[in-house]
Amino acid sequence: MTTLGESLTLPCGQILRNRTMKAALSEALGDRTHGPSTRLETLYGRWGSGGFGLLITGNVMVDRSQIAEPGNVVVDDDRDAEALTAWAKTAKNGGAEIWMQLNHPGRQSNPIASRGRPVAPSAIALKIPGMATPRELSTAEIDEIIDKFAETARVAESSGFGGVQIHAAHGYLVAQFLSPLSNQRTDEWGGDPERRRRFLIEIVRRIRSAVAPGFAVSVKLNSADFQRGGFSEDESREVVRALTEESVDLIEISGGSYESPAMMGKAQKQSTRDREAYFLEYAETVRAIAGDIPLAVTGGFRSRSAMVEALASGACDVIGLGRPTITIPDAATVLLESDRERLTVPTVEFGARKLLGKVADISMLDGALDLQWHTDQLHRMGDGSEPDPARPWWKTLGTIVRRNGFDALRPTKRAA
């Protein structure tokens, strides 16, 4: 029976010391030129000594002109090699592996942080207020973006990162290619499920050709995007099947987008809430399809017993932890070395709820507040302070307005 403390050997030969993974969380701690700041080193020093087997960074952009949010790190050449090396080394000092999450926002490009109009498979706007209609990518531009993913992976490897994770979930560019709602092309990059997944498959192939055999290449994939007519579980299973033909070392299962945020635990069935993990049932349906590729499931895990049961059942091989690691940066050590059964995550909501509910969608406001509250905690740790689980909601409201203006009071792209 697999346990949390058991090591895992990946297809590339890399060994994770245990089955806990700090999942990607967008830190927004890049410097003014989008390089990695020393605050990232401090933050990952905390997580690196937290007992995890694997750390996944937050969104690292592959294109300097297309950025998901202010503060994202961009890696499109070697200019920040020294700072990247320090980041990786600090994280690995505690014994964990660190992989860089590679991302392109596509139509989710942030208008404050990006230069120029967003790009996407098709000129279809995101159904979120304030987001511009993207420009459809040409075939030449698509090929250039695939090269950018490979170049960022090459730089990550040369800087000491042990692997990369391709972000193919949560409505970002790769997920946009996968979904028939956002990809309505009829050329070699769209028109049917096989052509829609070609973008992801080509990224995997080009990255693998740019890095050494022992460097890990992984994918974060939606089980579905939870939108009528969108990327379905059946299509997702076929993507997993296609990935078994490529040199992939881990598939992390997630789901949803910022139009339908299932990754935040919204509208989950009671049976799912009882089992804690939002996407475990889907993982069970692809376990046999994935073959020798290990599966990680992230989203909803809070108790040791649920994690142990998920591993013991064979549904997944790695337990991904996101929000619990923000206020409990040594969550893996807590699970592996103490008798504590549950990781408690604070619930953050607006005050004056009756008044606000008369003029705005209170659930939407709560979502924005909750995401920024957790980002504030990351910034505290980046500054060398301890997390503050008792931080009041009104302090975070001030942070939101100061950083992004009043327009930011809507669900934002904070969770990677």
Image (spheres, grey):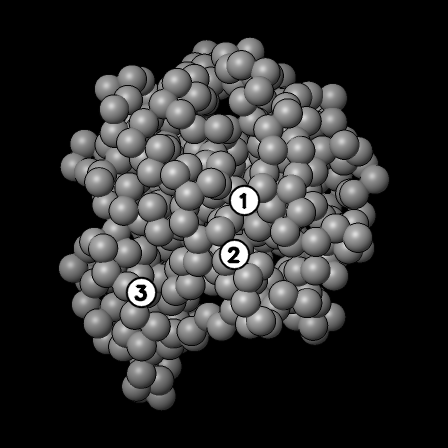
In the depicted structure, whether residue 167 falls above or below residue 355? above
Q: Which residue ends up furthest to the front in the rendered image?
A: 337
**Which residue is found at the position 22% from the left and 38% from the top?**
37
Residue located beneath label 2 in the image: 332
Residue nearer the viewer, 135 or 169: 169
**Outermost right residue:** 288
Q: Position of residue 288 (x, y in %)?
A: 83, 40
Is residue 62 visible from the viewing direction of this image?
yes
Total label count? 3
**Residue 237, located in which quarter of the rendered image?**
top right
Amino acid on which the number 1 mark rests in the picture: Gly
Mark 3 or mark 1, earlier in chain = 1
Tell me if label 2 and label 1 are in contact, CB under 8 Å. yes
- Circle nearer the viewer, 3 or 1: 1
Q: Which residue is mark 3?
A: 387
In the picture provided, is 317 more to the left or to the right than 185? right
User: Looking at the image, which residue is at 37% across and 81% down?
Assistant: 357
Say which amino acid is labelled 2: Ala
134 or 222, nearer to the observer: 222
